[in-house]
Image (cartoon, coloured by chain):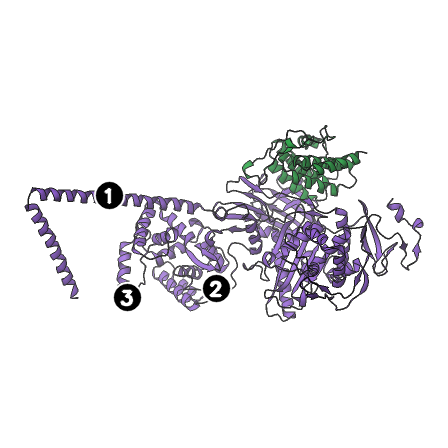
Amino acid sequence: MQRYGFIFLTLGMVVGCTTHMPVPITNPGLNDKPATDIAIAVPELPLHSDQPNVILPGPQTSPAVMKLLEQAHSATLQGDLASAESFLERSIRIEPKNPLMWHYLAKIRLQQGRFNEAAGLAQKSNALARGDKTLQMDNWRIIAHACNRSGDLAGAQEAQRNIDALQR
Amino acid sequence: MPHRPTRKRKHSEKIRKVWGRLRRLRSSGKGVVAGWKLQRKHLWRGLAVLAGLLVLYVGYLDFVVRDQFEHKRWAIPAHVYARPLEVFVGLPLAPDRFAKELVSLNYRYAYPAKDPASYQREGDNFEFTTREFHFWDAQEPSHSIRVEFTNNVVTALKDRTTGNNIELVRLDPAFIGGIYPAHHEDRILVKYDEVPSLLPQTLITIEDRKFLSHHGIDIRGIVRALWQNLKAGATEQGGSTITQQLVKNFYLSSERSLWRKFNEIIMALLLDFHYQKKEIMEAYLNEIYLGQDGQRAIHGFGLASRFYFEKPLNELSTAQIATLVALIRGPGFYHPEKHTKRLLQRRNLILDTLAEFNIVTQQEAQFAKQQTLGVIAERRSGITDYPAFLDLVQRQLREFYRDEDLSSEGLRIFTTLDPVLQQELEAVVHKRVEQLDQQRHLHGKLQAAAVLTTINPSVEVLAMVGDRNPRFAGFNRAVDAIRPIGSLMKPAVFLAALNQPSKYNWLTTVEDAPLTLKSQEGQTWSPRNYDNKSHGSVALISALTQSYNQATVNLGMAVDFPAIIDTLHRLGVKRNIPAYPSSLLGAVEMSPLEVVQMYQTFASGGFQSPLRAIREVMNAQGERLRRYPIEVQKTFEPGVITVLNSGLTQVVEAGTAKSVRQQLPKELLVAGKTGTTNDTRDSWFAGFSASHVGVVWVGTDDNQPTGLSGSSGALRIWGDMMSQVATTSLSFESGDGIEMHWVDPVTRRVTDKPCEGGMNLGFVKDTAPREVVDCSGNVITAESHWLPNLFK
């Protein structure tokens, strides 16, 4: 599993919720929903995620999915998020109950600046991540971040409460 | 002919007079001569201007001819592809279905299957070579693969070249159709080099024998036609060359005038000047109008061949080629069904002419003349085998693309269709509807629509049928049949109740008793049950599984309307729901596709996703244009949906849909709801597993009673459909705020184990009755029971 050690490291850092939000989209002109960055008007919530947060796929993950994750990772490194999301969708088709796949896709959406979609995917991941507190917390961070960036302060606060509750 | 000399004489007198005047003008002095010179100067100037205008006009025509010809020649239809099959170890897939998949991809059976698009099979093992394909996320090269199946699961996947195990292989996707919506013109492009040589030979022999030697127009042909027409006293021969016919089809309106004829001749000359005969013939082959299919105009021989004979052009017989060429002169005038004799005569005339010019032998012509027309009676859409699905794809595309982009830009559309499931669904719908129709003496009027979707990773349409004859491209009932949904509405009413767990759980009682409601306008409404009986105080679960109407209305009135309407909207229903009590029993109208949208929220555990038929769109050069991304939005707490789903499972296990159990594998747990509307006008079933949602409607277009309830009609088709899908069973476990309990729905008590008639139902934590009984009804003290410990 060592060779996958750096999978999604780049994305993990994005969840660190900084004010800088790169939105590298390969085809900006054709992107359905351009990111509306209204974070300037919304104060950032203090998120307990200053460290790069990377959750690696577990040993039960199938070789087919591992292969796709590898490809998604390398696409991400090249800034080709449109390919990365396709690789991840394919991996979800193979393991739809694996919450990690949904989590990774949520991170990609966040990086694309598609906040509502990111939050929805993180919710989906949480619905599947029974008992996995680390993953649940990370999903709530995505939700808090997404809500914050899209101006849903109440949603961001609720997400933060969930993070706090899980940390207790 | 007495008038001719008279006319001639008059004409020469006129000329003499003019010359006389001119001479007089010349001899009458200087001023006059100067005036004449001035006039002549004006004349020359006028002529020069005219010539200039003419040159300009011809230049303009030249531009039009070249511009349109270039563009039209390269206009490529959008190509639509099915989903690509991905094979990996652990994939549940029957070897026979894998074989069907390869056939739908037009792979040919060959040994040793080393060429792309070939395969061989030994028992449950396959060796095959894929075509290379440019996907959205990667260029997939051709792979040579060995795949092994054991008990309908892929157990080994190897690269045949290296012998190594591989993780995953993605096959090329099946081509399922093209899109040509502009002007309703439909065509399948053919290349000159790919068409059987008999076709252009026949065209030249019949339409334009000088085609290869003339310069776009055939003067002698025009004169001959004029002469023939004069002799016959009517317009019989047009004298148009193939080039002129092409010009007419390409650039000009159908109006008949001298000006148009002038344009036609100039443009034909220009076309011939700029392009080779082969190019002109190819354009003609693709352009010519050959038939009508409702609004759709059939253009070109590629499509006409599919449309009339269900064959590609290069598989047509001599007689069939002659038939298509016969249609050029007027597809309506020579309509294969309306004017069969006329068409046969013209076809045979063509065959005789071909023999006369030694294009075919006398024997061939004689043999061909013996053949029937062979035009298929129920002509299917020429663009696709799956008209209902393609119709949905086009509707989704039109949200972002103009029709002209779809028809000319060569877009590559990647869809969600599973071609094997689609074919299976078509077969079961067709067979069942025939059966039910005969059974109920409906004289062919019974219709059906069915939609099968996966919910992973998003709601994707796998298969879709909009007509009992699924290849018929007509009214797409899966999308456009908007019908009352009847009891399919009930789960929304029960969900609205269960969403208030402090007030309602599956064992809460509700009155199934007669009731009369008065509308504001003073009208009264007294709902009755399907069996015309009232069942008194019943548990919520019994009201749902037995689909009691009176109990549902009572429950709905107690829960309150706004909560139910809100529930419906959170389930993805976009329609306005009238706040009438009859809405509670499904007076609301929806299409099968909308019902899928509603039920997928149950299947997805409270997450809403827009239904999609398209994944990606690329352009002809392989550039990425648009992705239809996965979108999920949580609209209900997953827990309450688990509670509801446990009840909907009992509809299939012990309720109105019990009969479907015989059709399904024993271990497969599914959930759903039957729906029947007044006097059995609509028969519905909507149901799901953990991975698939299916909705079926059965009824007649003129809204006649069919005698079919949800369970005796639609459910049969649904059962057939679901028994063919490799689907995942629903499963229910305690946890995340939900408790599963065995209950006795009659005594409405929680039991310590499964008892006869018992049901396994979900409850929001701490809402189930605390008292637990054994199967004889003896109370087991809470302390001695294991349940309280489990849920601490």
The residue that label 1 is drawn on is: B49
SS assignment at label 2: loop
The residue that label 2 is drawn on is: B374
Q: Residues within 10 Å of mark 1 (few under 14, many from 20)?
A: few
Vertical placement of residue A154 versus B8, above or below: above
Which callout, 1 or 2, points to the residue nearer the camera?
A: 1
Chain shown purple: that is B
Q: Are marks 1 and 2 on the same chain?
A: yes
Chain for numbered disc 3: B
Which callout, 3 or 1, points to the residue nearer the camera?
A: 1
C-alpha gap between disc 1 and disc 2? 59 Å
Give whichever of A121, A75 is nearer the camera.
A121
**Where, by quadrant of the figure, is residue B357 drawn?**
bottom left
Chain for numbered disc 1: B
Q: Amino acid at mark 1?
A: Val
Q: Position of residue B326 (x, y in %)?
A: 40, 61
Q: Quadrant of the N terminus of chain B?
A: bottom left
- Give the mark nearest the N terminus, 3 or 1: 1
Q: Is residue B684 left or right of residue B318?
A: right
Q: Which mark is residue B233?
A: 3
SS assignment at label 3: loop
Q: Residues within 10 Å of mark 3 (few under 14, many from 20)?
A: few
Give whichever of B134, B553 is nearer the camera.
B553
Q: Are marks 3 and 2 in contact (CB under 8 Å)?
A: no
Chain shown green: that is A
